[in-house]
Image (spheres, rainbow, N blue to C red):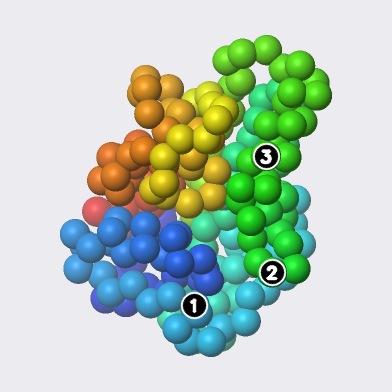
Amino acid sequence: MTRRFTSDQILIATHNAGKLEEMEQLFAPRGVQVVGAASLDLPEPEETESTFVGNARIKAHAAAKATGMPALADDSGIEVEALDGAPGVYTADWAETPDGRDFLMAMTKTHNLLETKDAPQPRHARFCATLVLAWPDGHDEVFAGTVEGTLVWPLRGKLGHGYDPMFQPNGHDITFAEMDADQKNAISHRADAFAKLIKGCFD
């Protein structure tokens, strides 16, 4: 039996403005106020696990413990079939530079690796998202979502964030970065995990 969420405020344990905006849009119909970790000056805990659920747990529990609020954390990434699932849990690491994250660099690296391997077309990939909702007493609930698609090159679209300009979800002829927020939020990996969260803890 999953624990029900009964608060009118939820802390989103992310410093990523794109993710926070996505969560605000997803929670808006529920009347739940979203608070971002950055607005409370919370430190970003080190993500030391090798799985999405492990890293999401670190972030959610650190935020819940620090604030006494229920906290929702997401760990997500893209798994490329021809790269044996890489970058996967290290998706953000592939974009790290001394001046912040550069996803154009990360996508270029991914494309170059595929070219070097002469990976056949279509180049299958999936976005994965794991949501962990943690309470200050240490309890948590876990929900995972995915969306399957193929990688495109050159990049297309200016919307979204991360690998969105490179990812075309199955059944669509445009990338995530060519979709408006409503279109993407209807089918994304995070939306899949979010729907399970709502069913498990809210409905």
Report which residue position mark 2 lands on: 99
**Dot in front, 3 or 1:** 3
Residue at 61% of width from left, 47% of height from top?
A: 104
Earlier in the chain: of badge 3 and badge 2, it is 2
Question: Where does the image place residue 22, in percent across and percent down from the top left?
Answer: 37, 57
* Amino acid, disc 1: Ala
Report which residue position mark 3 lands on: 108
Residue located farthest toward the front when viewing the structure as drawn:
154
Element marked by disc 2: loop
Question: In the figure, is residue 112 to the left or right of 168?
Answer: right
Question: In the figure, is residue 43 to the left or right of 6?
Answer: right
Q: Can you tell which mark lies on residue 46?
A: none
Residue at 72% of width from left, 50% of height from top?
A: 94
For marks 3 and 2, give the CA distance. 18 Å
Dot 1 alpha-carbon crowd within 10 angstroms: few under 14, some 14 to 19, many 20 or more:
many
Residue at 61% of width from left, 51% of height from top?
A: 103
Dot 2 alpha-carbon crowd within 10 angstroms: few under 14, some 14 to 19, many 20 or more:
few
Please state which of residues 35 and 174 is positioned toward the viewer in this rendering. Answer: 174
Question: Where does the image place residue 93, in percent across and percent down from the top left?
Answer: 72, 55
Query: Does any portion of residue 76 appear in the rendered image?
Result: yes
- Residue 152 vertical position relative to residue 22 in the rendered view, above or below: above
**Residue 196's quadrant in the figure?**
top left
* Amino acid, disc 2: Asp
Q: Can you tell which mark lies on residue 37?
A: 1
Question: Where does the image place residue 197, in percent across and percent down from the top left?
Answer: 38, 52
Element marked by disc 3: helix
Residue at 73% of width from left, 26% of height from top?
A: 114
